[in-house]
Amino acid sequence: MASQKDLRVRSVFKPGLFAGKVAVVTGGGTGIGLAITKELLSLGCKVVIASRKKDRLQAAADQLAACIPPGSTAQVKAIPCNIRKEDEVKNLMSSVVSEFGRLDFLVNNGGGQFQSPVSALSLKGWNAVVDTNLNGTFLCLREAYNAWMSENGGAVVNIVLLISKGRPGIAHSAAARAGIDNLSKSLAVEWAENGIRVNCVAPGSIYNVTAAENYKAIGDVFAHAIPLTPAKRNGTTEEVSAAVTFLLSPAAAFITGETIKVDGGWDLFQVSWPIPEHDKMPAYDWEKIIEEEDKLKSKL
Ligand code: ADE
């Protein structure tokens, strides 16, 4: 990216749409978060990217900064933050307001999970995933509210998961994201009077290099996703970013407490867990129960 002269973004949204606006994007230096950061920057937004991995985060910010065209209102800054740590999240939001004078948008994209059936999950593993995804999002929401949005309004998009059918294999993360989905609905109502909209985007299988790296040990999850997706392909990070940008934009001024799926139809169609042949689920059948009772009686 460093050798590029521009951000390599061709957003369908109009240039300058977010001039003068300030956003925080957690996990904004990689994968889906990076696409969101690039699109917001391309629309003139000032973007603070935040994540735990300081060096990787600063390198991403440096590369992005080098790609901002001259004369743009856009700016990018890296602020390291472990979203699990209350003091670090407080520092993130208050630093943004003191440096940039405002905080219009929050994109809660930082988080993650590892594959494991629930039976093999340790409490430590469960807690780590819930802490990062659910508690981290809660802290970011509350501190963005405290630092700026309570008085000045704003728009929030939480990146979640498709959860309508559960998510066997990543149940800990799905439980946390279901919590975020529900929290967003509560906040859409609690914070309407503050002029804050809170929405979610639930991506399906979205190909990106970071995710491919993270998942390579468990096989080609992106090839596996294609037959499960009515669109018969993986999604792009741009397709998620477009939904996020829309929800942050004035075009979504009357949308709050909503979750947009960006999944090529996966959620309506998915078969997500192989189930071996078994006979472990006996039917509730009165005739059979009576037969069993009669058998027992005849033995007495
Ligand atoms: N991305 C994954 N885990 C994170 C964390 N604890 N803080 C910030 N970004 C993260």
Image (cartoon, rainbow, N blue to C red):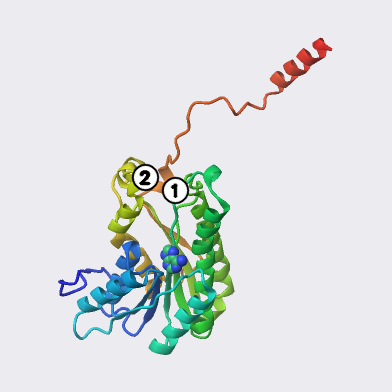
Horizontally, is 241 left or right of 96 in the view?
left
What secondary structure is marked by label 1?
Answer: loop
Q: Residue 222: percent from the left, percent from the top?
A: 31, 47
Of residues 231 and 66, which is closer to you in this image? 66
Residue most extreme to the right: 300
Any part of residue 175 in sight? no
Look at the image and tell me in which quarter the N terminus lies.
bottom left
What secondary structure is marked by label 2?
Answer: helix
* Alpha carbon distance from label 2 to label 1: 8 Å
Q: Is mark 1 within 8 Å of ligand 1?
A: no
Residue 218 shows which numbered tag? 2
Horizontally, is 16 left or right of 200 in the view?
left
How many numbered tags mark residues here? 2
Q: Amino acid at mark 1?
A: Gln
At x 49%, y 62%, the residue is 133
Q: Amino acid at mark 2?
A: Ile
Q: Residue 116: percent from the left, percent from the top?
A: 47, 46
Horizontally, is 49 left or right of 276 in the view?
left
Q: Are marks 2 and 1 in contact (CB under 8 Å)?
A: yes
Asked if 272 appears above or below 44 in the picture, the reply is: above
Q: Quadrant of ligand 1?
A: bottom left
At x 48%, y 63%, the residue is 258
Asked if 16 appears above or below 239 in the picture, the reply is: below
At x 33%, y 43%, the residue is 219
- Judge the density around disc 1: few (<14), some (14-19), many (≥20) Cα neighbours within 10 Å: some
Residue 115 shows which numbered tag? 1
